[in-house]
Amino acid sequence: MLVTKQPVLKRFWYPVLPLEQLSEQPQSFQLLGQHIAIWLDEQGQPAAVEDRCCHRTAQLSKGTVVDGNIKCPYHGWTFDATGTCVRVPQIPDSSVPATYRVKSFRCAQRYGYVWVCLGEPLAEIPLLPEADDPHFRLIPEFYEPWNCAGLRVMENEFDTAHPTFVHPKSFGSPDHPTPEVMEIVETARGIHLRAVLGVVNPPLQQQNLKMAQTGTVRTMDMDWFMPFTCKLRIAYPNGLVHIIVNTATPINDSSSQIVQFCLRNDTEAETKAIDVVAFDRQVTLEDKAILETTEWDVPLGVSHEQHMLTDKPGIMMRRKLLSLLKAHDEVEHTQAKSKEGVLI
């Protein structure tokens, strides 16, 4: 699936920047191949427009913010959050023509990040009740580009067979190549997976979990929010809940911006955020090393790759995405026209 060829993907919300990056000047981002300029308006709310001035195509993100509007660095034309040109220094005594405007996009802030939707939204930004729960703290973890498809990242998050082989230095157990429990249901926004997997606890993880034993089990409740956001809730026997929220924001067909933060029901005094991030960072880099070797044109028809039982969540993702494309009369790629194969 080539993400930039699927117009319906523009109708979902994606986190594109940590909000703190907008404190001083505009920023640029490429979302589904679309270059956008992002800044804070006069009310401190994020705004997003096409990163291309309608005058001579200069990048607006290279400009400055004046009274909550973005000013082009080339000739000083200034645009508001709706993309309307509100000032042209060269014609101060006449009204600005209505044709002087740039395309604007829906923009919002949530969970410490700027979210952008390039079209009419099909769904709201994923709701995370724990983010408003005073018993949980939010810890930003990673913000970096990966050279892989977002769908590969989502499938990997729900793949309970890879930890033994990809994560032997962090938590994968050689004695548990498959989960003890794997229950999957389809939801309105995607899928839900409940799984129980035996894992090991290296020293850093023992410190994070306040557990001395070297082995334990992860009870995982995982939600996939179509197309590229997932929530992994891990419950440990000692009562700790560690929630990882991960979005593979699509930059273009071959790369994704990985935006990840976690929510935990402990305090900084109990476990330092830097240690939490350090362990999750190790795990994430182990995933990255493998995922960046995979092909980013992911086939939605399941007959193009071989599968096993633990691949069922990924197969369900592919089928739901294919149904989404068909529902919006979009022809994906020649692979989407082929037979889907049999769900295992």
Image (tube, rainbow, N blue to C red):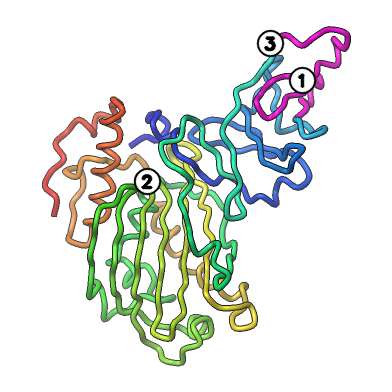
Q: Which residues are magenta?
A: 70-98
Going from N to C along the chain, the mark reached first, 2 or 3, is 3
Label ID, residue 98: 3
Callout 3 environment at 10 Å: few (<14), some (14 to 19), or many (20+)?
few
Q: Is residue 46 visible?
A: yes
Going from N to C along the chain, the mark reached first, 1 or 3, is 1
Seen as rendered, the residue at the extreme left is 342
User: Residue 218: percent from the left, percent from the top?
Assistant: 35, 76
Given the image, on which type of amino acid does mark 2 rest? Met
Foreground residue among 157 and 240: 240
In the rendered image, which quarter contains the N terminus? top left
Q: Is residue 73 magenta?
A: yes
Foreground residue among 5 and 293: 5
User: Residue 109: percent from the left, percent from the top?
Assistant: 61, 47
Is residue 79 placed above or below 314 in the rendered structure?
Answer: above
Instruction: Identify which residue is drawn at 68% across, 42% down.
Output: 45
Q: For residue 330, what is the image quadrant?
A: top left
Given the image, on which type of amino acid does mark 3 rest? Ala
Task: Tell me the CA gap for discs 2 and 3.
Answer: 37 Å
Instruction: Identify which residue is drawn at 56% across, 59% down.
Output: 142
Q: Is residue 305 left or right of residue 28?
A: left
Helix, strand or loop at mark 2: loop
Q: For residue 337, what is the image quadrant?
A: top left
The residue indicated by pointer 1 is 86
Given the image, on which type of amino acid does mark 1 rest? Val
User: Residue 308: percent from the left, percent from the top?
Assistant: 17, 59
In the rendered picture of this protein, how many numbered marks are placed on residues? 3
Label ID, residue 226: 2
Q: Is residue 207 magenta?
A: no
Helix, strand or loop at mark 1: strand
